[in-house]
Image: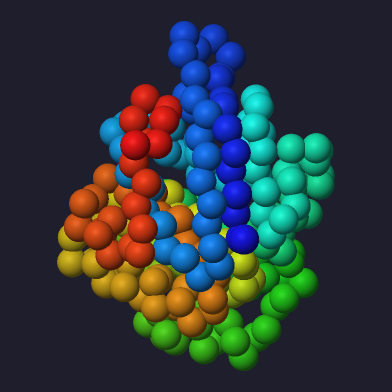
Amino acid sequence: MLLSLRDVTKTYPGAEAPVLRGVSFDMDRAGMLALTGESGSGKSTLLHLAGGLDTADSGMVAINGTDLTPLDDAGRARLRRGTVGVIFQQFNLIPSLTVAANIAFQARLAGRHDPDGALALARRLGLGDHLAKYPEQLSGGQQQRVAIARTLAARPDLVLADEPTGNLDEATADTVLAVLCELVAETGAGLILVTHSERLAARMDRRLHLRAGRLT
């Protein structure tokens, strides 16, 4: 089992109600899961807990059989580095680095940098002619492709994508998601896609819907 959550709860300080109320689900390797729900339903919180970016108040989160609950910040960071890749809506590229350096960044941290593999990945994503450019010189769609390449170059077991096409027009979003799904499938990684789009959610193998902190 790639990912397991059991009775996970989360309440932020000062909040009147829990963000997550006893969430449980399992995810196999190579699965593609859409996570949907209204704004404020807890989607991003659940994604962050699944990737060890935040800690639950109670319950269990396990990746590849390793329970994240007893790990400190450094322990979770070590696990994430080699296991989890995150694609954010805002891209989060490093503006002072070229496209090539941005793509290599996460793979270097994970000790998995493969220059030939990174180049092949960039070309698959239509970035072969842009490797010497900087993020500000790219379109939004191109920047998102760089973010995808950066994540996949590290060869994570689990890819978490938080509204990765939210800043893109419909046609570009469809193209970017198609390439993402194709590449994730080839690597055998699992994918959790947070999205408001019914159209994009329908392209996943499975769907979970959050409402008021519970899965429905």
Examine the rendered structure and indicate whether residue 203 appears above or below residue 100.
above
Q: For this rendering, which residue is in front, 71 or 120?
A: 71
Q: Is residue 210 left or right of residue 104?
A: left
Q: For this rendering, which residue is in front, 95 or 119?
A: 119
Residue 138, position as x, y percentages in the image: 37, 67
User: Would you identify the image quadrant in which residue 11 lies?
Assistant: top right
Q: Is residue 154 left or right of residue 196?
A: right
Residue 187 appears in the picture as rendered = yes
Quadrant where the N terminus is found in the figure = bottom right
Q: How is the image coloured?
A: rainbow
Give the residue at x 51% y 70%: 30
Q: Is residue 132 left or right of residue 117?
A: left
Give the residue at x 47% y 73%: 184
Examine the rendered structure and indicate whether residue 158 appears above or below residue 36.
below
Give the residue at x 52% y 57%: 27
Quadrant where the C terminus is found in the figure = top left
User: Would you identify the image quadrant in which residue 5 lies?
Assistant: top right
Q: Is residue 181 left or right of residue 87?
A: left
Residue 137 appears in the picture as rendered = no
Residue 34, position as x, y percentages in the image: 36, 54
User: Would you identify the image quadrant in which residue 113 lies?
Assistant: bottom right
Residue 155, position as x, y percentages in the image: 62, 73
Give the residue at x 23% y 50%: 197
Residue 54, position as x, y percentages in the image: 63, 36
Q: How many labels sit on residues? A: 0
Examine the rendered structure and indicate whether residue 96 appears above or below residue 108.
above
